[in-house]
Image (cartoon, rainbow, N blue to C red):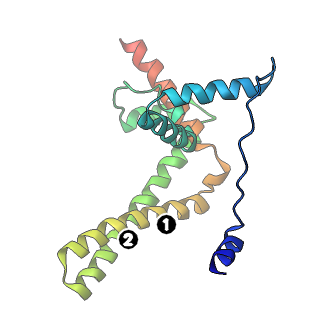
Amino acid sequence: MMLARARDLVGGFNWQPSLPRRKPEQGTNIGKQEKEMEDSSSQSFFKKHWEGFTGFWSERFSFLDNYTRFKNLPSWSSSDVEEFIASNPVHGPVLKTTREAVNYGLTGSIIGAVSTAGFAYKYSKSLHGAGLSFVAGGVFGWTFGHEIANHTLQLYRLDTTAAQVKFMEWWEKKCQGRS
């Protein structure tokens, strides 16, 4: 009786006998899939999982592909950024607004870190708890500050990533011209 109830809860045992394999026809995807299965079976367990792991996260962080080509750029100063803002009428104002949004994030981070660490230390008298709450409050404050900047400065209407990439392209061209 108990086995029957467990089988009903799980959905029954759907055991099916294996069917004989037939040779795939030319031009079908079945042959390609079987070949991929054979190729993947020859790989090691860790290599298959590592490729799956990196594929999964590279899809989620695909926006970083915009920045991977700018690996060896020298650092720039705020005067270089101001020069770009003045020279590019399309992406310059967007970059300026994006730089203003950072101030909102920093302010939120400082307020969040100090206030949560202060409360944690006041009520627990624990330095490690205050330190952890300082870090967590800084992260949460940065997030809230950035959201306030998004709404206040209307960043949701702007393509900030394109402006940053255009600045890096401009900086790359300028640095190549120097050398």
- Along the line of sight, the residue nearer the viewer: 172 or 33: 33
**Amino acid residing under circle 2:** Gly
Q: With respect to residue 21, does 140 lie above or below? A: below
23 on left or right of 126? right
Residue at figure coordinates x 40%, y 27% from the top left: 71
Residue 26 location, x and y as percent?
80, 17
Q: With respect to residue 31, does 162 lie above or below? A: below
Callout 2: 10 Å neighbours few (<14), some, many (20+)? many
Residue at figure coordinates x 48%, y 32% from the top left: 67
Q: What is the total number of numbered labels drawn onto the structure image?
A: 2
Residue at figure coordinates x 64%, y 75% from the top left: 3
- Choose top left, top right, bottom left or bottom right for residue 12: bottom right
Secondary structure of the residue carrying tag 1 is helix
Residue 92 appears anywhere in the view: no
- Along the line of sight, the residue nearer the viewer: 72 or 87: 72
Residue at figure coordinates x 23%, y 81% from the top left: 121
Secondary structure of the residue carrying tag 2 is helix
The residue labelled by disc 2 is 112
40 on left or right of 126? right
The residue labelled by disc 1 is 144
Q: Quadrant of the N terminus?
A: bottom right
Callout 1: 10 Å neighbours few (<14), some, many (20+)? some
- Choose top left, top right, bottom left or bottom right for residue 119: bottom left
* C-alpha separation, residue under disc 2 versus residue under disc 1: 9 Å
Residue 39 location, x and y as percent?
56, 25
Q: Quadrant of the C terminus?
A: top left
Residue 163's tag is: none
- Along the line of sight, the residue nearer the viewer: 23 or 143: 23
Decide: marks 2, 1 in contact (CB < 8 A)? yes
Residue 61 appears anywhere in the view: yes
**Amino acid residing under circle 1:** Phe
- Along the line of sight, the residue nearer the viewer: 22 or 155: 22
